[in-house]
Image (cartoon, rainbow, N blue to C red):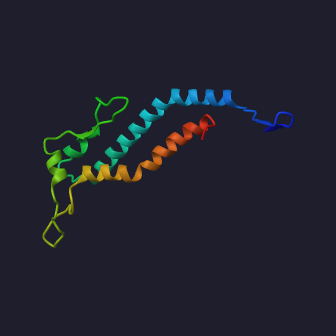
Amino acid sequence: MSFNTATGSIGFKVTGLLESIKGLDAVMREWPIVEKATLNEAGRFIVNEAKRNVHVVSGDLKKSISIDPISSPKVVVVSAKTRYAKIENDRRGDKRQTAKTVGPYGPHDYFTRAVQAVQRDFASRIKVNFDKLLQRHRLG
């Protein structure tokens, strides 16, 4: 900062503007790549959570949980591809353990819990991915 006593004006010297513009351009080029990678990571997170929580009898439902190939750059679709996937998710699963019962016990809302887990736990992962992008170009 400088002050001109003759005119009474004050001035600033801006440095690093070109570097900032180049950094922003690089971030904008890489943004869709990081966005898609983060979406895929969220999809894999949901798949893993759903498979971890699903009630397994034959294993068909668990095997059918996957990321759909019809996913687009802005959307990742995770689904369970059996006729009874929604029915199983909606079942109360209020069976309780006794001496005469055979598990598993508890709720069957495997997909609902997977979505809740990604909503609860994945925000920090999103922040990390985009913070890394900004830091890579010295903007974070």
- Residue at image x 51%, y 40%? 130
Q: Quadrant of the N terminus?
A: top right
Q: Residue 65 location in percent, x, y?
A: 26, 42
Front residue (pair 49, 98) = 49
Q: How far across and how far down the image is residue 131, in percent?
A: 54, 42
Residue located at (31% from left, 49% from top): 115
Q: Nearer the viewer, residue 4 or 77?
A: 4
Drawn side of residue 136 relative to residue 50, left or right: right
Where is residue 89? Give x, y as percent: 19, 51
Out of 15 and 7, give the one closest to the viewer.
7
Q: Quadrant of residue 25?
A: top right
Relative depth, front residue between 5 and 63? 5
In-image side of 92 versus 26 (left or right)? left
Quarter of the figure with residue 69: top left
- Identify which residue is drawn at 61% across, 34% down: 137
Q: Quadrant of the C terminus?
A: top right
| Side (left or right) of 62 relative to 32 | left
Which residue is drawn at the image coordinates 87% and 34% (left, top)?
A: 6
Inspect this view and state whether residue 57 appears: no
Please identify the residue farthest to the front as the structure is shown: 7
Q: Is residue 139 visible?
A: yes
Horizontally, is 29 left or right of 45 in the view? Answer: right
Q: Is residue 56 above or below residue 79?
A: below
Task: Identify whether 13 is placed above or below 108.
Answer: above
- Outermost residue on the bottom side: it is 99
Q: Position of residue 81 (x, y in %)?
A: 20, 39
